[in-house]
Image (spheres, helix red, strand yellow):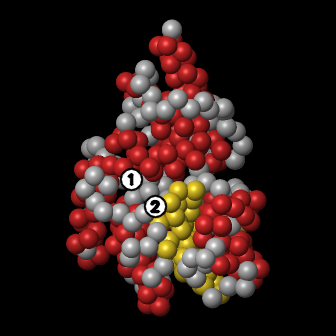
Amino acid sequence: MDKILKLFEFIRLYLFTLFSNISPNQNIKFYLIIFLKSAFFNFKYSYKNIFKPSNDLKFKFSKGNYWNRCINHFNFIEKYFDTHQIYKAPVCQFTVQTFSSRFNKKLENTFFSNNKLIYYSKFLSNIFSNVNNKSMIYWFGSFYYTFNSDTISDNDKELIQNSHVLEIGPGLGLNCLFYSDFNSKQIFYYDLSVMLRIQKKIEKKIKKTQNLNEIIYNDDVVELEKTLKHKEYYIFSRYAFSEFPINLRNKFENLIRKSRLSIFLSNVEFENVENEKYFQELAKKIDKKLIIKDYYYPEQDKFTKKHKYFILND
């Protein structure tokens, strides 16, 4: 009887993913490709855990905006995928990471010879199965580059060395490695509750061999404000915040106002919100200086050349 119930639950949650469109655009051909990939890979990496799911949580079908639809996929992979294979889920490939077993870039820029970047990339490649190490260097380096290039000023870099960090939408949570290098301050993660569960699993694997700063997880903005009230912190968000619906972005205004520095990497538009206009209006509203910079990263993909950094400070 127990196995029948577990099989029923697996089928129910698998069907949730089939009825949740996670295509980042409206192209029908692209939608069909993603639908088929999700159907195949979600089953391929989950069926072995049908009768031994990672939790007994019960989930309802989530519908609405893009991220609400993604929740159905994340709930499924968190429950049925092994941690080292989570990155193989199509929903992860489109939302939180792009490292893989295939890679064709040359990585000739001297930045890719950074010793810490190479060390951490090799370490992460060993945590996840069948990852091309160069792919990991390129992907993880895209985060690290923000803090080691002239994207931010020397004064900003000094501030970062002495402040707590709040990352909004930290994906798989892997940036904890270089945050823990910067200083010994606390790391605050804000994300969907299902993503926090995934990040905690990965943190557990990382901490087997690496020392990390304390990570505090939160999916409630009000509670996050209370926690950070008397702390000096900066904010970093790579795409996630600029893909939030406006009503959720509005909840972060006080946190952004009180931060010493906020760094947002953003695409041009998401779900009919023009992000440059949004950040210009936000800067005026909370009385912050806004610096806009074109996104640059060595050997970057062509489509990212339209993306921008929006940097808010006092």
Q: Residue 298, image x and y in percent?
A: 36, 72
Q: Name the element at disc 2.
A: strand
**Residue 73 lies in quadrant:** top right
Q: Which amino acid does the dot numbered 2 rest on? A: Ile
Horizontal side, residue 271 vs residue 133: left or right: right
Q: Is mark 1 on a helix, strand or loop?
A: helix
**Left or right: where does residue 1 sit relative to residue 227?**
left
Please name whichever residue, 191 or 305, is drawn nearer the observer in this view of the structure: 191
**What residue is pinned by disc 1?**
203
Give x and y (percent) for residue 174: 39, 58
**Which residue sits at x=51%, y=50%?**
196
Residue depicted at 59% across the width and 50% down the height: 192
Image: 54 above or below 10: below
The image shows residue 255 at horizontal and vertical percentages of 66, 72
Instruction: Name the residue nearer the viewer: 265 or 156.
Output: 156
- CB under 8 Å between discs 2 and 1: yes
What residue is pinned by disc 2? Answer: 215
Q: How many marks?
A: 2
* Residue 12 lies in quadrant: top right
Give the residue at x 59% y 43%: 70
Q: In which quarter of the image is residue 212?
A: bottom left
Q: Residue at x 45, y 51 (%)?
A: 199
Cα distance in 3D space between marks 2 and 1:
9 Å
